[in-house]
Image (tube, rainbow, N blue to C red):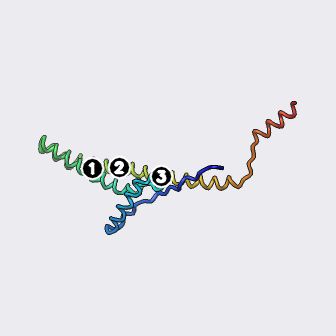
Amino acid sequence: MGRREAPPVTVEEDSGGNWKEWPARAGEFLRNLFDLQFRRLLTPRMLPTLFVLAIIASGLWVVAYAAQGFSISLTDGLVRLLLIGPLAFLTMVTCARVALELCLAIFRLAVHASRMAGHTEDIAGGLPRIQFWKSARRKGGEDEE
């Protein structure tokens, strides 16, 4: 009736792209960042950048952890650098990747659910409205009186 249609939400994933397109993409990023109606989701486009930042942060953590080990002793530093550090790096990067993929799956699921709801409204709009619960009460009530 007086129902207002929500603007469509789109998920655009960042495919990397060319460095020459960077100024145009930065402008588009800022426009999408300050889009108050949330027509375009920004998080899925940021996932590659977030993953690179997670890799860099994991690498810096391993270097700091190894440096701290070397400040304790040479043996401790070598164990941290050659054994614990690589395992910790792989674990942290794997966890970051899983978390980001989960985030992307949630966004994709939300977009597909929104599309499905739109299709359901289109289908339901063309069907006749049948209200079983009201018609059964009326018939039962009229027969008893």
- Residue 28 in percent (x, y) is at 39, 61
Task: Report the mark closest to the observer, 1 or 3.
Answer: 3
Which residue lies at the image location 37% right of the left edge and 55% below the top edge? Answer: 46
Which one is nearer the viewer's eye here, 139 or 71? Answer: 139
Tag 1 near tag 2, CB within 8 Å: yes
**Residue denoted by label 1:** 58
Seen from this angle, which residue lies furthest top?
A: 145
Pointer 2 local density, CA inside 10 Å: few below 14, some 14–19, many at least 20:
some
Which one is nearer the viewer's eye here, 8 or 60? Answer: 8
Which residue lies at the image location 35% right of the left edge and 48% below the top edge? Answer: 95
Which residue lies at the image location 42% right of the left edge and 59% below the top edge? Answer: 13
Pointer 3 local density, CA inside 10 Å: few below 14, some 14–19, many at least 20:
few
Tag 2 near tag 3, CB within 8 Å: no
**Residue denoted by label 2:** 96
Distance between the Cα atoms at labels 1 and 3? 35 Å
Q: Earlier in the sequence, mark 1 or mark 2?
A: 1
Pointer 1 local density, CA inside 10 Å: few below 14, some 14–19, many at least 20:
many
Of the numbered discs in the image, which one, if any, rests on residue 91?
A: none
Distance between the Cα atoms at labels 2 and 3? 29 Å
**Residue denoted by label 3:** 37
Q: Earlier in the sequence, mark 1 or mark 3?
A: 3
Q: Earlier in the sequence, mark 2 or mark 3?
A: 3
Query: Mark 2 falls on what kind of element?
Result: helix
